[in-house]
Image (spheres, rainbow, N blue to C red):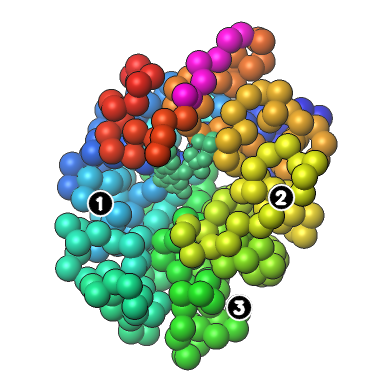
Amino acid sequence: MDIFSPINIKGKEIKNRIVFPPLVNFAWSETDGIAIPRHVAHYEERAKGGAGLIIVEATCINQQGRIFNYQLGAWSDDQIDGLSKITATCHKHGAVVLLQIHHAGLTTRKGVSEFAYGPSVDPENERSVELTIDQIHQIRDEFIAAAIRAEKAGFDGVELHGAHGYLLTQFASSAINRRTDEYGGTTENRLRLACEIIDGIKASTGKDFIIDYRLAACSPTLTDGIEIAQLLEKKGVDIIHASHGGEKGINAEVPAEFEFNSIVYMGTVIKKHVKVPVIVVNQIQTPERANKIISSGLADFVAIGRDMLTDAHWANKAKKGENIIYCIDCQPKCKRYVKATSCPLFSE
Ligand SMILES: Cc1cc2nc3c(=O)[nH]c(=O)nc-3n(C[C@H](O)[C@H](O)[C@H](O)COP(=O)(O)O)c2cc1C
């Protein structure tokens, strides 16, 4: 088995193990959150370039939960048409395509919303407000409605953004969630919102609609990540995409002989504790390294983020043994976080 081995998920054939993970295109859409031709061309190129599974960037379920004002949205039926152009082109080139649905919670910026809503007040954030039960139910219903819109737009499924310190991570993490009602306390309670969203999506979408969960493998520790992954598996998620938990998560220590970073390591540990397919990600970069992970059974999928931004044809070039244009790893962080065109290798 290698990165080019196909795999079937919910009756959908994914032609290889190479995933283009969600990478938000800052400042491409207007405040209406509608996908524009530039988004379509961006995803078309990665689908043409051979990625088997494409996960479209963080797309917000309501306007108050955006990370910033110019982010894709799935809060209105007006957004379905633009999204359906992305799915049509990805399918044309043989990729399976998911939509990452998202709410930033406590990390919502001031320019987006006066208040930043989360499971509990964040003592370090004076704009933070604890969600009422009614507001939690509303957000649950908005996640479900976003998934229904994704299905209408032709997506093969959704990825719930439960990583990187956003709303679902905030609920799941005992370091952030200090509620004493049914949405806080035990792991089951902290995962109640995610589980209710999963139940709602299952009840209102087709039987072959994929539900992937981007997991904070350390929220706040790897032991929690394992427990949460097992609970999500029991709930019926189809894929777990293991990443980090944001600033409040504690990355696990990597054994000396392990060749990859702690985020990949945590994903491989999660893989040992669940039966559903697991995606690992972060600084995997080359086909050789990606193949090591898949051929040794450490994970089921490898996600290649920034290196597939700099070379949309990473997968096809890997297959043909051609030279790939690698990301040069700008410090202190990727320039695409500010503006896509700021990337020194931008060529779209
Ligand atoms: C510019 C940029 C935007 C990103 N946007 C998202 C996003 O929308 N959703 C998400 O879950 N992760 C996002 N990420 C994280 C990536 O999905 C990925 O986990 C990260 O880039 C590490 O993988 P890599 O080393 O292969 O790039 C983003 C990363 C970058 C650099």
Q: Give the CA distance from mark 1 to mark 2.
A: 34 Å
The residue at which mark 2 appears reads as 254
The amino acid type of the residue labelled 3 equals Thr
Residue 321: image location, x then y, percent? 66, 10
**229 to the left or right of 312:** right
Residue drawn at x 46%, y 59% as measured from the top left = 247
The residue at the far bottom in this view is 180
Q: Is residue 342 magenta?
A: no
Q: Is residue 326 magenta?
A: yes
Residue 269: image location, x then y, percent? 74, 54
Residue 172: image location, x then y, percent? 53, 71
Q: Main secondary structure of the magenta part?
A: loop
The residue at which mark 1 appears reads as 68
Tell me if residue 45 comes above or below residue 71 in the rendering: above
Residue 332 appears in the picture as rendered: yes
Viewer-closest of 92 and 230: 230
Task: Specify the segment rendered in magenta.
Answer: 322-328
| Label 3 residue SS | helix
Q: Give the CA distance from mark 3 to mark 1.
A: 30 Å
Quarter holding residue 302: top right
- Counting residues from the start of the chain, the first of labels 3 and 2 encountered is 3
The residue at which mark 3 appears reads as 187
Residue drawn at x 57%, y 40% as measured from the top left = 282
Viewer-closest of 292 and 274: 292
In contact (CB < 8 Å): disc 1 and disc 2:
no
